[in-house]
Image (cartoon, grey):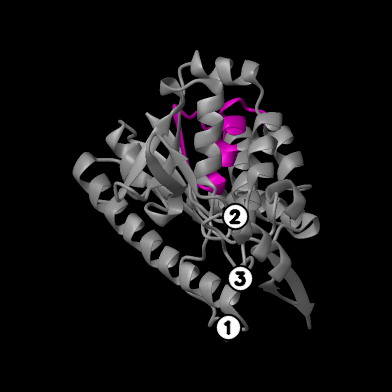
Amino acid sequence: MRALVISGGGSKGAFAGGVAQYLMEEAHHKYDMFIGTSTGSLLISHLALQKIEKIKQIYTTVNQEDIFSNCPFVIHKKHGIETIGIHHLNVLKNFWRGSKTFGESHNLLKLIKKSVTEEEFNTLKNGPKDIVVTVSNLSLNQVEYKSINDFTYDEFCEWIWISCNYTPFMSLIRKDGCEYADGGLGTMVPIEEAIRRGATTVDTIILQTEVTHLNRLPSKNVFSLLTNMFAFMLDRIEHQNIRIGKFVANHNNAIINFYYTPIVLTTNSLIFEKEKMTAWWESGFNYAKFKSAESSQIEPIITN
């Protein structure tokens, strides 16, 4: 059984889309299972449907307004470097309404339902492929994996949305008596879950460089401090997920193929820019093509 696993990474999901496009259209990999976290959860339904051009169009045209119903920050650009500042009015509005987060992302749920129709959902649910998204249950202090086979259309769209809600900048969802947030807060790279569900070969797209290539700039405000802190924590979670994934693969005779970003794409994945995301998609496609050509010169490496 072959699985495609896509990590979290916000706007960097465009790179993952390019990698997946090459693997599916050029390398002709057939996947039985798709598992995603955060931005990976947004990609996998369309990939499973093989509607790659459709999701490419979405990822290369999306902007802040498509994601946020109340955006808590403003984007500043100086000397080609983008930073975020607090949108004080929007944050105050959110608190005045009784929200527990700085911003809200209800527009993203609308986008998900607009891009994945009920007919497409039924095609996937009645098909042989398993589509799984990762969410973090903050109330029970655990990671949960939601399969398309277990939910209705509206429910599964909501789980995709929850998987992408990067709190405290995006919505915190209360569902089934529990509070849920971005799946990346618990599992950035769900390799272990793919193998637990029976995968013997796992193509894993990680939206981070394999080796750290940067020192973060000093925090300018409380938002940049928070994003830096979260980036640090998610990076640690990601490395832990990879180590555990390799360990589990060793004990289950599974093969993992890793696809990292070759360069640092952005230091703030909450910023969605059409030009950059279009370039990242093409970069992902070309990187997978290069890696495929390179790996064809050597014998496959099993992780044990």
C-alpha separation, residue under disc 2 versus residue under disc 1: 20 Å
The residue tagged with tag 1: helix, strand or loop? Answer: loop
Pointers 1 and 3 in contact (C-beta within 8 Å): no
Residue bearing mark 3: 267
Q: Is residue 39 left or right of residue 275?
A: left
Q: Which of pointers 1 and 3 lies earlier in the amino acid sequence?
A: 1
**Extent of the magenta region:** 27-51
- Residues packed near mark 1 inside 10 Å, few (<14), some (14 to 19) or many (20 plus): some
For the point 69% across and 70% down, the residue is 88
Residue 227 against residue 289 in the figure, above or below:
below
Residue bearing mark 1: 219
For the point 47% across and 73% down, the residue is 229
C-alpha separation, residue under disc 1 versus residue under disc 3: 12 Å
For the point 75% across and 56% down, the residue is 279
Residue bearing mark 2: 10
Of 115 and 170, nearer the camera is 170
Of 274 and 170, nearer the camera is 170
For the point 73% across and 33% down, the residue is 54
Of 64 and 7, nearer the camera is 64
Q: Which mark is residue 3?
A: none
Q: Nearer the viewer, mark 1 or mark 3?
A: 1
Q: Nearer the viewer, mark 2 or mark 1?
A: 1
Q: Position of residue 116 (x, y in %)?
A: 65, 28
- Residues packed near mark 3 inside 10 Å, few (<14), some (14 to 19) or many (20 plus): some
Of 137 and 7, nearer the camera is 137
Three-letter amino acid code at the position of disc 1: Ser
Q: Which of pointers 3 and 2 lies earlier in the amino acid sequence?
A: 2
